[in-house]
């Protein structure tokens, strides 16, 4: 399997997002026994193809910051890598856009279900499916659509009161990218202050929901945190937060 993913990133590299490319390499490095958060990507295929980025309209370039840090949470390269492995086994090649496409279609189907009683059901689907921002994300293989898929899956199962499944979906979303953590306070407030008749045992539901979510996050993130705490904190928290300590 090694070496079968990364060469793809050299094809039409201007269409293939560097986040997808580095996730391909991060998964391969993990299979080699290396910590994706403690290595440099300069001497990899990623470094060769994405080592420098266009900085302005005049063509000035700067070193790609991703050469020295992997800023996404572990579920990003784990899900991407596992799906890529299946793709290569089935088709003989792999590409992050396939996972993005599956996520894109999944979101549309879930929105269709969630909006089934809405008079603007078709408009919701059209606005999402033909939003140029999401279309660009799809063509470049950006992982934002994957995150949105799990957020929408969480909402759909949460509304149906499938708390364990919704907690798993939320845990996966929280283990992908940092911005998802911003919705946690609203979820807790919803549990605590929802009408009594809606949830007969809110504290029990909140406890179950919280424990399952924490378990998913722990399983996906804790191994990499304890592998090298400072490297993990630097790559996923300090650097995205504007610090390069």
Image: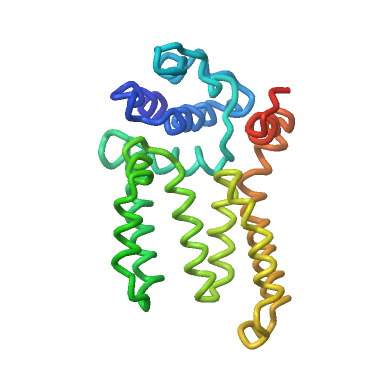
Q: Residue at x 69, y 63 (%)?
A: 211
User: In the shown orientation, is residue 111 left or right of residue 181?
Assistant: left
Q: Residue at x 74, y 29 (%)?
A: 230
User: In the shown orientation, is residue 119 left or right of residue 205?
Assistant: left
**Colour approach in the figure:** rainbow
Q: Residue at x 61, y 84 (%)?
A: 198
Quadrant of the frame with the C terminus? top right
User: Of all residues shown, which one is farthest toward the left?
Assistant: 91
When the figure is inspected, residue 195 is found, relative to residue 81, above or below; the finding is below
Q: Residue 184 is drawn in which quadrant?
A: bottom right
Quadrant of the frame with the N terminus? top left
User: In the shown orientation, is residue 39 left or right of residue 206?
Assistant: left
In depth, the one of 209 and 186 nearer the eye is 186
In depth, the one of 3 and 225 nearer the eye is 225
Where in the figure is residue 53, as x and y percent of width and height?
45, 18
When the figure is inspected, residue 103 is found, relative to residue 195, above or below; the finding is above
User: Of all residues shown, which one is farthest toward the bottom?
Assistant: 197
Where in the figure is residue 149, as x and y percent of width and height?
44, 55
Where in the figure is residue 242, as x and y percent of width and height?
67, 29
User: In the shown orientation, is residue 191 left or right of residue 145?
Assistant: right
Q: Residue at x 40, y 12 (%)?
A: 59
Where in the figure is residue 236, as x and y percent of width and height?
64, 35
Instruction: Give the total of numbered labels.
Output: 0
């Amino acid at each position: 399997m090694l070496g079968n993913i990364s060469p793809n990133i050299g094809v039409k590299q201007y269409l293939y997002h560097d986040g997808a490319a580095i996730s391909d390499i991060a998964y391969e490095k993990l299979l080699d026994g290396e910590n994706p958060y403690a290595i440099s990507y300069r001497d990899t295929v990623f470094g060769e193809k994405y080592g420098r980025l266009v900085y302005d309209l005049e063509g000035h370039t700067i070193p790609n910051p991703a050469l020295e840090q992997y800023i996404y949470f572990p579920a990003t390269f784990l899900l991407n890598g596992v799906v890529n492995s299946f793709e290569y086994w089935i088709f003989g090649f792999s590409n992050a856009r396939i996972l993005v496409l599956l996520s894109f279609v999944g979101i549309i189907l879930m929105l269709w279900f969630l909006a089934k009683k809405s008079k603007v059901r078709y408009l919701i689907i059209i606005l999402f499916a033909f939003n140029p921002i999401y279309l660009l994300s799809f063509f470049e293989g950006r992982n934002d659509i994957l995150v949105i898929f799990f957020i929408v899956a969480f909402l759909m199962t949460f509304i149906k009161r499938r708390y364990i499944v919704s907690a798993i979906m939320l845990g996966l979303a929280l283990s992908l990218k940092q911005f998802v953590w911003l919705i946690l306070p609203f979820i807790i407030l919803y549990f605590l202050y929802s009408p009594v008749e809606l949830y007969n045992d809110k504290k029990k539901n909140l406890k179950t929901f919280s424990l399952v979510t924490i378990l998913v996050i722990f399983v996906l993130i804790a191994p990499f945190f304890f592998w090298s705490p400072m490297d993990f904190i630097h790559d996923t928290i300090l650097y995205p937060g504007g610090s390069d300590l």
